[in-house]
Image (spheres, rainbow, N blue to C red):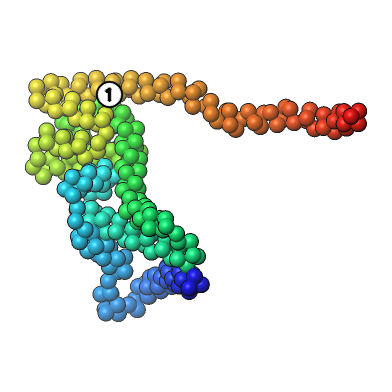
Amino acid sequence: MSALFASILLFFIISVVLSVMGFRLWVQPQTALERVMGEVEVAQQNVRDPALSFRDLLQRIGNMVPANPADVGILQRRLLAAGIRNPRALRLLYGVKVSLATVFTLVAGGVLFGFNLQDEMAPFQLLAAAGVGWAGPNFIVSRMASKRQDQIKRGLPNALDMLVICVESGLGLDQALMQVSKELRHAHPEITDEFAVLNLEMRAGKRRTEALHNLGERVGVDELKKMVGVLVQADKFGTSISQTLRNFSDYMRVQMRQEAEEKAAKIGVKLVFPIFFFILPSLFVVTVGPMMVRVMRDFLPQIMGNF
């Protein structure tokens, strides 16, 4: 029975690998060559892309999953923070979670029953595999959102300086945001993308205050939320936007310098464990090792001979 399950699992893995390799190495190049040579028939042009069909399948699976409204709001904010704004992304995420949980459970079951590893802990192991498949996409999305937030935080001071220059040169805030999104799109694409979305929302008819609040909530970076609050207050009370942005830019520079100094002060403490576990043993081997070899070779036989 164990050999049968192992054979089935091996056949399934080999079939999947060969199918993927065949699709990538034969189907796609052949289709591209026929498209270039003009030999594609009309019936072949109407064939649906397998990737789109797979995406639709995942979306259908996600639509069948009952979701808690609170969890939906959290996942939606994570997707927006990761830069994923497709309205179907949430249902695709649920479809991926269900698919991975099923695949991980089947693989774990095949390994346990194929190699006779099942015991009283087998149900918990299958449940753990399903949990990993279910929670894995959430972890990936969270990592993507965190990385993008770090990139936005890193590019915010430069964007603020460019924004101050544009406003002081005579541009309005809307035109300045548009100009910044054009000038910094290669250096800091994440924050310029958010500024472009802000411009699109204001063009669509939203008030500037509402669009700015949406920017802060969508990105989830504290520094950007502070900038939004400063701009809203300046717009509300009629103060100088250029001076407000300049003051906030100076505040950001001071804050970044203080954070750098704090990280530099923590380096000594963080280096204690690497030094103790990795550097000191090698140092002892280099310094004490030759002496120990000489002691074992010259003095130890004499000592043992005396006894």
What residue is at 19 percent from the left and 30 percent from the top? 228
Quarter of the view holding residue 157: top left
- Asked if one can make out residue 144 in the rendered structure from this viewpoint, the answer is no
Left or right for 122, reference 97: right
- Asked if one can make out residue 93 in the rendered structure from this viewpoint, the answer is yes
Instruction: Locate residue 55, reporting x and y percent.
Output: 28, 63
Instruction: Locate residue 210, reporting x and y percent.
Output: 11, 36
Instruction: Locate residue 278, reporting x and y percent.
Output: 60, 32
Quarter of the view holding residue 258: top left
Quarter holding the C terminus? Answer: top right
Q: How many marks?
A: 1
Viewer-nearest residue: 8 or 136: 8
Viewer-nearest residue: 77 or 27: 77
Left or right for 32, reference 52: right
What residue is at 64 percent from the left and 31 percent from the top? 281
Instruction: Locate residue 53, reporting x and y percent.
Output: 27, 68
What residue is at 35 percent from the left and 40 percent from the top? 147
Label 1 neighbourhood size at 10 Å, few (<14), some (14-19), many (20+)?
Answer: many
Viewer-nearest residue: 42 or 24: 24
Viewer-nearest residue: 94 or 227: 94
Quarter of the view holding residue 165: top left
Amino acid bearing label 1 = Ser
Q: Is residue 172 above or below residue 186?
A: above
As helix, strand or loop, the secondary structure at mark 1 comes to: helix
What residue is at 22 percent from the left and 24 percent from the top? 245
Left or right for 185, reference 8: left
Q: Is residue 43 above or below residue 53?
A: below
Tag 1 residue: 249
Q: Is residue 97 above or below residue 3?
A: above
